[in-house]
Amino acid sequence: LGTLIDRPYIHINCAATMDGRIALPDGSRLAISSPWDKARVHSLRAQLGSILVGAGTIISDDPKLNVNPDYSGTGAVIAKIVLDGRGRIPASARFLRTEGRSIVLTSGSASEGWAASLEEVSEDVSVVRLGDGPDIPIAKAWSALSDRGIHGVLVEGGSHVISSVLSSGAFDIFTVYTSPMIMGGSGPAIVGGAGFPIPIDLRLTAMQIPPGGGVLAEYKKV
Ligand SMILES: NC(=O)c1ccc[n+]([C@@H]2O[C@H](COP(=O)([O-])OP(=O)(O)OC[C@H]3O[C@@H](n4cnc5c(N)ncnc54)[C@H](OP(=O)(O)O)[C@@H]3O)[C@@H](O)[C@H]2O)c1
């Protein structure tokens, strides 16, 4: 994993409806993944050794960011990474209390008091400041993770994080599980933010209709 390049191996993954929505219109969690897909994602977390999400996902879903043995068949302990340039996530967040290291990547825009409140939760929590912010250049984030012994990262969203990572070009593979359901409306899409000046072209490298329905598509850079 990531031995030939100076960054971890980066796998972006998300689950979407047929119309590309990844959550309910108010941003709350939408059950999109099939049991097969949950097993795949939890196994990927265990295999890659770490998971990364953005501050928005922590604030709206409060996920544990762990490997659930009920889905993966294994109880691996992984590193949990959050991109939070302004320092918005609360110290009550559940992932700070699950087993394994928690690494919160932030910037000079976040307050010292906020950083201290997270680090007080456990000795496994570290807050790392990268640049003046609030945006953290993705290359800097990957290099900080490499320096901390992280060799593989499963980037799970949400929309703004996927946008940041796609536009950086610093990723290896992007998988999308599309569920046979349609949400409509204006909920968060796979890629959020202002969009790109020109479309990012990807190459479809594999497709599968898994047991239980849906489509799993795998893309790589052109
Ligand atoms: N279906 C799925 O597979 C899936 C998976 C995960 C999440 N979700 C859904 O996604 C939604 C959340 O998406 P979201 O777009 O609102 O939030 P998000 O992508 O989780 O987090 C966005 C925030 O992260 C911070 N951030 C992102 N990139 C950064 C960078 N390069 N440098 C510094 N900070 C950075 C920013 O915080 P600041 O604005 O404070 O700077 C940004 O607002 C939720 O509704 C959740 O349910 C779905």
Image (cartoon, helix red, strand yellow):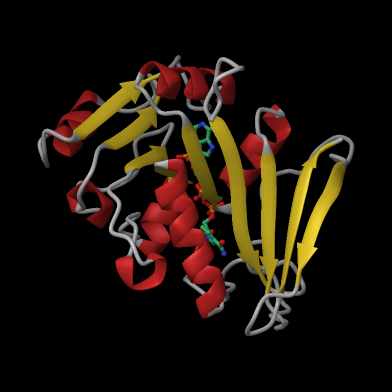
Q: Is residue 58 left or right of residue 98?
A: right
**Residue 190 coordinates in the image, percent (x, y):** 68, 57
- Quarter where residue 128 is shown: top left
Q: Is residue 191 visible?
A: no
Q: Is residue 17 above or below residue 189?
A: below
Which is nearer the eye, 17 or 175?
175
- Could you tell me which residue is drawn at 55 percent across and 75 percent down? 36
Measuring from the top left, give residue 108's x and y in whole percent.
38, 19
Residue nearest the viewer, comparing 196 with 209: 209
**In the picture provided, is 43 more to the left or to the right than 139?**
left
Task: Quadrant for the C terminus, please.
Answer: top right
The location of residue 192, given as percent across then percent down, is: 67, 50
**Is residue 216 shown left or right of residue 94?**
right
| Residue 203, position as x, y percentages in the image | 86, 45
Is 105 located above or below residue 144 in the figure? below
Q: Up-down: is 57 above or below 152?
A: below
Q: Quick one: which residue is furthest to the front in this view?
A: 73
- Is any part of residue 66 visible from this angle? yes
Numbered-mark total: 0
Tell me if 13 is positioned left or right of 214 in this view: left
Q: Which image quadrant for residue 116?
A: top left
The image shows residue 159, relative to residue 134, as above or below, that is below
Q: Residue at x 10, y 36 (%)?
A: 120
Kindly indicate the quadrant of the structure image that contains residue 137: top right
Q: Residue at x 40, y 33 (%)?
A: 86
